[in-house]
Amino acid sequence: MSAEFEHSASSLAPTYYDALRRLTLELAGVNLGANHAFLIETRLARLARREGFKSLDAMVNELFQTGGSRLAVQVVSALMERDTHFFKDKSSFKRLREVVLPDLHRKRGGGRVRLLSFGCASGQEAYGMAMTVHDMRKQLDGLKIDIVGVDYPSQALDRARAGRYTHFDVQRGLPIKSLIEHFDPVDSDWVIKDHIRNRVEFRDIHLLSKLDSLDQFHAVMFCGSLPHYSAPARVRVLRGLAGLVKEHGYLILGDGEHLNQMNFGFDRVGRETGIYTKREIIIEPEIDPSLKVSNGRTTFEKTKKKRSSLN
C-alpha cells in the first residue's frame, strides 16, 4: 500500500464486525457468517485506499457516523465480491449451449435475443456466454444476441468493464484455444478482444431492488449465488428474476440449485433441476355483464387470449 494509507495492525472493534454483517444482510440479503474478520479487513482496506481514506478505521468510522448510502453500497459490494472464474459452472454452460441457444434460434430465427448474467461479479460468466455464442455462430446463423452483465457497483465490476485479467485468472477454467482466440496479451495480463467485448454490456444495479430498468430477457444465468442469500432475500431475488424473463424464456441456475416448491411462474425443463422456462401468462377476457345469458353461459364462448411468446 502507499505511504499515505495506514493499515493498522490492530483489528476493527468487534461491534464493527457485527454492524458490517448486519449492513450486508440488510442491503444485499447475504449473511457473511461469524468467521470473516480477515476477509472483511482485507477487502475493506483495498476499498479505503481506493476511496482516499487514510486508514480502514477512518472509512468505517465515516460509514457508521454519517450513514452515507454511496459508501454503504461500496462497502457491501466489496464484502460480497465472489471468487469466480471462466466457465466455473460447466453444467450451466452446457445447458446454455445444448438447450437454450438452439431452442431460441429455432423459435426466433433471424431475430434479436437478449441474455443476462445476473450477479456477474468480475465478468467471467458474461464473457463466457459471449465466447459460447461466438463459437456457435454457424449454428446460430442470423440470430443477433446481446448480453448484459449486472451486479452491485464494485471493483469487480470495474474489472469486468475493463475486460482485463491476470495470468492466474485465465488459467482457471479457460481452455487454451479460447485464450488464444479471444484474448490479447498486454504486459503480464490478458485483455478480451473486441469481437467478444462488443457483445457484452455491464451495468451496476442493486440486485434486491426493482429491476424494471433492465427490460426483459430471453434467458438469464444466475449461477452459484442463490445459496448465499437469506430466505427472504432469496424470495425477493427470484421474484425479481421472474419479471425479467420473457414468457417461454429460460432461467439457468447453478449446479444443484433449484426453485423448490415456490416456482415463481417457472416450469422445470424435463428432469433437469437447474434449468427452467417461464410459464405463459393466460389473460381471461372481461365479459360484458349486459350480454344475454343462456343456460348459465354468455352468448359467446370465452376464449383465452395469449401473449405472443419470446417477442
Image (spheres, rainbow, N blue to C red):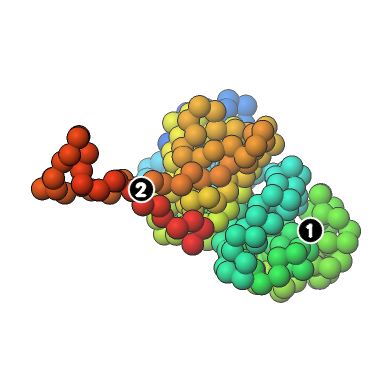
Identity of the residue furthest to the bottom in this view: 194
Disc 1, SS: strand
Q: State the image coordinates of residue 237 (x, y, percent, origin top left).
A: 48, 41
Disc 2, SS: loop
The quadrant of the image that shows the N terminus is bottom right
Image quadrant in which you'd find residue 222: top right
Residue appearing at x 74%, y 42% in the figure:
91
In this picture, residue 307 sits left or right of residue 140: left
Q: Nearer the viewer, residue 254 or 262?
A: 262
Q: State the image coordinates of residue 130 (x, y, percent, origin top left).
A: 69, 62
Amino acid type at circle 2 is: Lys
Which residue matches tag 1? Answer: 166
Marker disc for residue 280: none
Residue appearing at x 59%, y 33% in the figure:
258
Compared with 241, 25 (above or below) is above
At label 2, counting other C-alpha atoms closer than 10 Å, the crowd grade (few under 14, some 14-19, many 20 or more) is few
